[in-house]
Structures are given as structure tokens and as C-alpha cells.
């Protein structure tokens, strides 16, 4: 089993920054795929950033150049640095993991991921 716990959400004005963290514990492989998803009210959950077992990063177009996904050296904590935030970035942010021994592909759908955190709210005001 894998447990994921997010933190770091909050309220910020447009143009500000936040850093989300996701602490992973349990039987998670160091080369698992991990991702940050976002869900706004009335909208589908979308992947905003993902990182595979090779460290390759992927971003949705709307956050490219503003968000950075990373892992710590122990591969147990996932981060999302969010800069130049916009009101459209508001929503519940979820950490997710696809726990393969060596995850090399790019997985974008919520159904691709087996493990989820409880979510952390991000609110960006104009």
C-alpha cells in the first residue's frame, strides 16, 4: 500500500507563488510515476504536471513556464512549485502515484493512477 499526504495549499493573490508538497510512504517504488492533478468546481480532474521514473517532466500547456514538478533526492516527497499564479489555477490539487517498478511512459488520465492523496485547496484571487 502507498499513502500520499499533500500540504502547502492556501489562498494567494494573482501573481503570487505557492509550493505544494506530497509526502509518500509505504511500498512506493523510487521510479514510480507521480503527478499533480487539479480539479475546479464543475470541471474534470486534469493532470497539470507529471514526472516519470526517469525524471522526465510533463506539463499541461496552461502551466508551462510557471509550474515546476520535482522530487527530493530520496524520492519520497513530490513538490509542485507554482509561480505567477492566476485565478484559473484555483482548485483542489491532488497528488497521485502509479506505482510501477520503473515507470517510463507518460500517464495523463486519472484512471491511470492507483493512489491518491486527500487533496489541498489552492485559491487565487484577482
Image (cartoon, grey):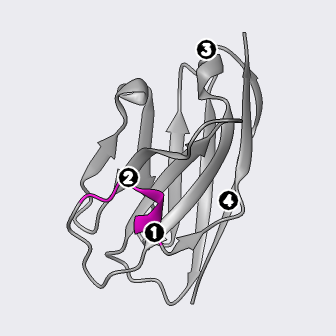
Q: In which image quadrant can residue 22 be found?
A: bottom right
Which residue is painted at 42% across and 39% down in the image? 68
Query: From the viewer's perspective, is residue 41 above or below residue 102?
Result: above
> Which of the two discs, 3 and 1, labels the residue nearer the N terminus?
3
Residue lying farthest to the top in this orientation = 126
Residue interval drawn in magenta: 106-113
Separation of marks 1 and 4 at Cα, in angstroms:
16 Å
> Which of the two discs, 4 and 2, labels the residue nearer the N terminus?
4
Foreground label between 2 and 1: 1
Foreground label between 2 and 3: 2
Which residue is painted at 36% across and 53% down in the image? 108
Foreground label between 1 and 4: 1
Q: Which mark is residue 6?
A: 4
Q: Quadrant of the N terminus?
A: bottom right
Q: Position of residue 106 (x, y in %)?
A: 26, 58
SS assignment at label 1: loop
Badge 4 vs badge 3, beta-carbon distance below 8 Å: no
SS assignment at label 4: strand
Which residue is painted at 65% across and 65% down in the image? 117
Q: Quadrant of the C terminus?
A: top right
Q: Which mark is residue 113?
A: 1
> Which of the two discs, 2 and 3, labels the residue nearer the N terminus?
3
- Which residue is the site of mark 3? 15
SS assignment at label 3: loop
Separation of marks 2 and 3 at Cα, in angstroms:
23 Å
Separation of marks 3 and 1 at Cα, in angstroms:
31 Å
SS assignment at label 2: strand
Q: Which mark is residue 50?
A: 2
Amino acid at each position: 500500500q502507498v499513502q500520499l499526504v499533500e500540504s502547502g495549499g492556501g489562498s494567494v493573490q494573482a501573481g503570487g507563488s505557492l509550493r505544494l508538497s506530497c509526502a509518500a510512504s509505504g511500498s512506493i517504488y523510487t521510479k514510480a510515476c507521480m503527478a499533480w492533478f487539479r480539479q475546479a468546481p464543475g470541471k474534470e480532474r486534469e493532470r497539470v504536471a507529471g514526472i516519470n521514473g526517469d525524471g522526465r517532466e510533463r506539463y499541461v500547456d496552461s502551466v508551462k513556464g510557471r509550474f515546476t514538478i520535482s522530487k527530493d533526492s530520496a524520492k519520497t516527497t513530490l513538490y509542485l512549485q507554482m509561480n505567477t499564479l492566476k485565478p484559473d489555477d484555483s482548485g483542489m490539487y491532488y497528488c497521485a502515484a502509479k506505482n510501477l517498478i520503473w515507470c517510463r511512459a507518460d500517464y495523463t488520465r486519472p484512471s491511470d493512477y492507483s493512489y491518491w492523496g486527500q487533496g489541498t485547496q489552492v485559491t487565487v484571487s484577482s
